[in-house]
Amino acid sequence: MKIIFDLRSVGLGNNGGSSTLVKSANTLVDLGHDVVFIDHMKNMHTWTPLKAKHRIIKRDQGKLPSADIIIATGFKSVAHTLRSPKRCGIKSHWIRGWETWQMSETNIIKNILHTPTVKFVNGIGLQEKLYSHDTDSYIVRPGYDLDELYPTGARYSRDKFIIGALHTTGKHVGIKRYGWVLEVVKYMKKKDPNVELWMMGTAGAPPQADRYYRLPNMKQKNEFYNGVDVWLSPSKQEGLHMPPAEAMMTKCPVVGNNTILSGTKDYLVHEKSGLVAKNDYKDFRDCVERLYNNPVLRISLGENARSCVEAIGSRQKNMNEFIELIKGLK
């Protein structure tokens, strides 16, 4: 199958969204499909080599290759996808976040939801969000690196209680509720000086972190997640939130929240693979404290955590399902 990922006015950088696209495209290439990234600039993503073709096409629609489907990858690429020639195939949009940092919700409804594209979403929360605006969609999850992130047993060999979380900077601090993480850690450290905060991110180390992993590779990620007793996921605006699931692959329980766009509904089950707090800081903090006080519960939830992610499956499984979905649309 010939597939175009439309990145015009979006681009590729060193971030989780770009990483998902690159790994999804690489998996499709490995499965034997012809994948092309159409971009307005050079590939700036350095975390993972791109196996798909990457072509810079700014305005000349005549240079676009023929395909079975063209997929907008961000809100700003939708207009480009809609203008693509008929020979580019089915016009679609893989929605992987509710991008209010790009446009207002009013404009999202008008310029994104009410456009004639087939909508794919990467998780249950986004599908529910689209349903609330009378828009149908298909769930397409990218899948997981199940063979690269796995439990090593390291977290059971020490006395400290280690909280794990993403270090967030810039425009996403508010929607990821980074302040909740810092407040929870401050509260827990008053209770027990052996509580530590381990963080992972792309920017410089925050002063609050006792250990910081900047731009970790998969081996370092596995070490990081296996060192954490509980992963905090207070974010209120995600598609399919990847780091909590990655932590769960190492049998680390997660504390999430019940907002519609928490990004964890696909794999985080309350009292089974972690704890789901109300949309309230104190309830979120109480869930963390509950796991601190109950190591047996942490182990039990952790044992189930990996199974919940495994049920979604590998990248190969999910991209094969994506191909079958596309075939059904033709």
Image (tube, rainbow, N blue to C red):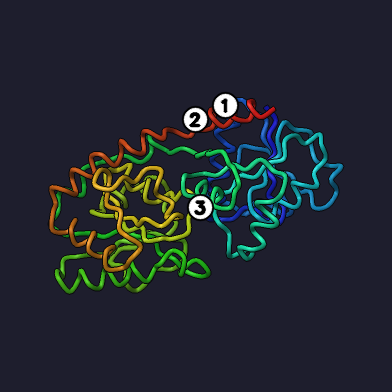
N-terminal of the pair, mark 3 or mark 2, is 3
Alpha carbons under labels 3 and 2: distance apart: 19 Å
| Badge 2 vs badge 1, beta-carbon distance below 8 Å | yes
Residue at 30%, 35% (x, y): give it. 307
* Residue 213 horizontal/vertical position (percent): 37, 59
Q: CB under 8 Å between callouts 3 and 2?
A: no
SS label for mark 3: helix
- Pointer 3 and pointer 1: residues touching (CB < 8 Å)? no
Determine the residue positioned at 36% across, 34% down.
Answer: 310
Q: Position of residue 207 (x, y in %)?
A: 34, 74
Residue 183 to residue 199: above or below: below
Image position, residue 72 (x, y; %): 67, 46
Question: Dot 1: few (<14), some (14–19), or many (≥20) neighbours within 10 Å?
Answer: few
Q: Name the residue carrying label 1.
A: 31
Three-letter amino acid code at the position of disc 3: Gly
Name the residue type under label 2: Gln
> Closer to the N terminus: mark 3 or mark 1?
3
Judge whether 81 appears above or below 52 on screen.
below
The local crowd at label 2, few if under 14, some if 14 to 19, many if 20 or more residues have their Cα within 10 Å, is some
Instruction: Tell me what residue is drawn at x 37 percent, y 55 percent.
Output: 258
Residue 87: quadrant of the picture: top right
Q: CA distance from mark 3 to mark 1?
A: 22 Å
- Could you tell me which quadrant the N terminus lies in? top right
**What residue sits right under mark 2 in the picture?**
316
